[in-house]
Each structure stands twice: as structure tokens, then as C-alpha cells.
Amino acid sequence: MACRGSCCCGSGPINEDNARFLLLALFIIIYLLCGAAVFSALEQPKEREAKERWAQRFEHFSQKYNLSKKDLNNFLRNYEEANVAGIRVDTIRPRWDFTGAFYFVGTVVSTIGFGMTTPATIGGKVFLMFYGLLGCAATILFFNLFLERVITIIAVVLKSCHERRHSNVVLPQNGRRVSEGNRAGGATAGGGEKGEDLAGWKPSVYCVMLILGAAAILVSCCASLMYSAAEGWGYLDSLYFCFVAFSTIGFGDMVSSQRVVYEGHATAAYRLGNFFFILTGVCCIYSLFNVISIVIKQVLNWLLRRLEAPCRCCFPRRGHHPHRHPRRNVVAPGHLRARRGPSIETDAINDSETDTGRRMSGEMISMRDFLAANKVNLAIMQKQLSEMAIGHPRQPSSSSHQNGFSGGVGALGIMNNRLAETSVDR
């Protein structure tokens, strides 16, 4: 009790979930401040130059045609209203015919939202709120299912390459050179261990991130070639558009497939290619973002472990205090963390965690657990919702296996239970 007042924690052990959340919030705030400083330094001079040039043109035009500034400003406001409705100086495709409306709903459900087309009627705005609610949810589910299949395919391919590489390894035995596969199938204890290591092998999360990054770059480069040729944009501008669109940022400063006809190009084929690249690019970038989020979580866990040393006086000694209940996910040194008992919620996931040597920071969950984790998450969510609906919420158990973001449903639940690295086991 004497060290509590002098320690930075003050109130005792820190809840690991809260510590990670606060650390991530601090990182995002610092990241936003740094980004604001960089963009302000890069873009503010250009903004000032554009304002000065517009003021000169406005003054010159009003004097040349003997127009009052008030009338000219009113006319410009009318044009801004027409611009919102989709009216442009250059001829563009209709915004609200069937093909234009299909393009619009695609940007809605994908959450890109370019902003070049917006509903102007009350009925359209009300319908959009209900339409987007179901459409966005369904599209996010589609992205999650796409993510599952991409990770499954990558894991199968990497495991196949790993097995092929091990089968090609030859070792001397009794004066002969035998393959690792034959050695693993033999009766020796060493061969049995090698076979077990191969069966429990998990691909690296960094390898998966590299593959997804390469796929996203490939799709963006190919799409940029198409946009440069069809839209007349520079290649760098096309890459910029691909990232903005594929990441669903959707500024709307550059929008593809807006002309009525594309001369020298098959208009229908280009619009089909535009749809294909946007769909593929959004899926790839979505998957890449989720894998990067796992790497960020690993960095946060590393930082939490680094921050443990100054606050070790706050951590409980071996055993439990007689008047203190154990807290979930307490940040404590690894040798003080007690293994929790299995729970009904995590039995299907914890099977892969029994081999302590395999839970390295760059490893993914095994294929069996990979395919079973989403069903476990869904069952947990349905169970919790059912208990809350009947007014008997489930009491949290001190033996529940909680590891940071694990146990969630959706993108984080999928990724953390398939690329699982738990702070408890590390």
C-alpha cells in the first residue's frame, strides 16, 4: 500500500482493455495533429494563391461587364445550387437515369459516397436513410465474408509452400539422405516432433499483410492505367483516385465514369471495368486495413509491456489479495499472469493455444480454429442478445479468456480470432 501513492497508476492494477484503448486514442490524436500540420504546410499556400486569383478575376469580370458585385454573387449562388443538383458546365451523363442511379446506390452501400450526386427531394432523403441502413450493413457483411475467404486461401497457399519446402529438406541418416517428409513419418521421436510442428504451423501475419498489400497495389496500378487512358488523368492522379475510392474515403473531387460517351473507348466496357476495379479494390483495401489493425494491436501490446516496468509495484504479488477480487486483463508481468480455466465461449478457440511454443507474435491461428472462430463469435453474440432480451444478462466470469479485442463480432472479431495473438500467452 505504501507504493500506491507514489506510483503513476495510483488506483492499482490497470485494466488491459482500458490501457490499450487509451493508448490507441492517444496515438490517433497525435496522428491527427501530425497530419494536420503536414497538410496545412502543403496545401495552405495553394489555397491562399487560389483565393487571390479568384478575387482578381471576380473584380475584373464585374468591371468589364459593368455588373454589381451583389448581383454577381447572387448568380454564383444560383450556380452552386445547380451544381449540387448535378448541373455542370461540361456535358456529363444524366445523374438520375437508371444507370446513374445504380452508380449512386453503389457509392452509398459501399460507403464511398463521392458526393457528386445527392438526393434533392424529401422522399429521396428519407428513403436513403432506410436504404443505406440495410445496404451498408449487408455490404460490410460481404466484405467480412470476402476477408474470411481471402485469408483462408492465403493460409492454404502458404501452408502448402511450407510443407513443400519441408519435404525438400534432406538430412543424413545412416549414411543416406532422406526427405524430411519421410523422416517425419518414421518411428523416431524426432520425426514425430517434426510432424507435429508441421501440423501446427501457422502462417505469419506479416506475410499475409505483404501479400494483401501487393494485391492492392497491383489492382490500383492496373486500374490507374485504365483511368489514365479513359478519363485523361495523369497516372499519379489516377493512383490518388484509386486510393480515395478503394479506401471508401470518397472526396468527390475526382469521379470516374461521368461522361456521356467516351470517344475511342467502348463506353459499356469501360463502365463494367470501372465497376469491377472499384469492387475488387475496396475488398482488397478493406482486407489490408484489417490486417494492418492487427499489426497496430501488436505494437500496442509491445508498448504496454514496455510500460509495465515502471509500474510493477502496482501489480499484485503471487496469489490473490484476500479482500480484492481479480480484475480482468490486468497488465502484469508475464510470469504473474495465471492461466485461466476454459470457458464455454472459447473452448473452440483455445485448442490452438495449448502449445506454448507456437504462439509467436507473427503467427496466425490454425486452419481448424480459423474456420470455427466465426461460428463461435456468432453464437456468443446471439447468446448475449438473448440474455439481454429476457432481462437476465450474463455475468462476466473471472475465468473467461479475454485478450484485448478478442470476442468481438465483425471485422475485428474475424481478424483477431483468425490472426490471434493474445497478450496473455506472450
Image: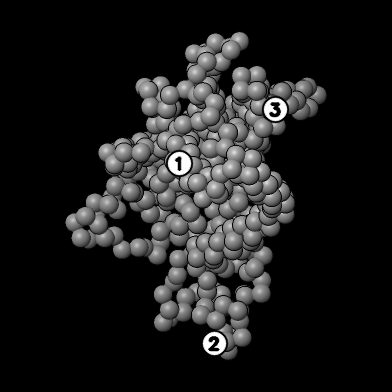
**Residue 353 appears in the figure:** no
The C terminus: image quadrant: bottom right
Amino acid on which disc 2 is placed:
Met
Mark 1 packing: few (<14 Cα in 10 Å), some, or many (20+)? Answer: few
Q: Which residue is mark 1?
A: 78
Mark 2 and mark 1 lie on one chain; the one further toward the N terminus is: 2
- Where residue 117 appears, as percent x and y from the top left, is 44, 34
- Where residue 188 appears, as percent x and y from the top left, is 64, 33
Do the numbered discs 2 and 3 sit on residues whose CB atoms are within 8 Å? Answer: no
- Where residue 283 appears, as percent x and y from the top left, is 51, 32
- Where residue 202 appears, as percent x and y from the top left, is 59, 38
Image quadrant where residue 24 sits: bottom right
Q: Which residue is mark 2?
A: 1
Closer to the camera in the image, 353 or 116: 116
The N terminus: image quadrant: bottom right
Q: Which residue is mark 3?
A: 235
**Residue 410 appears in the figure:** yes
Image quadrant where residue 54 sits: top right
Q: Is residue 195 above or below residue 317?
A: above
Q: Is residue 8 above or below residue 395?
A: below
Numbered label tally: 3
Amino acid on which disc 3 is placed:
Tyr
Amino acid on which disc 1 is placed:
Asn
Please name the residue shown 62% across and 75% down the image. 311
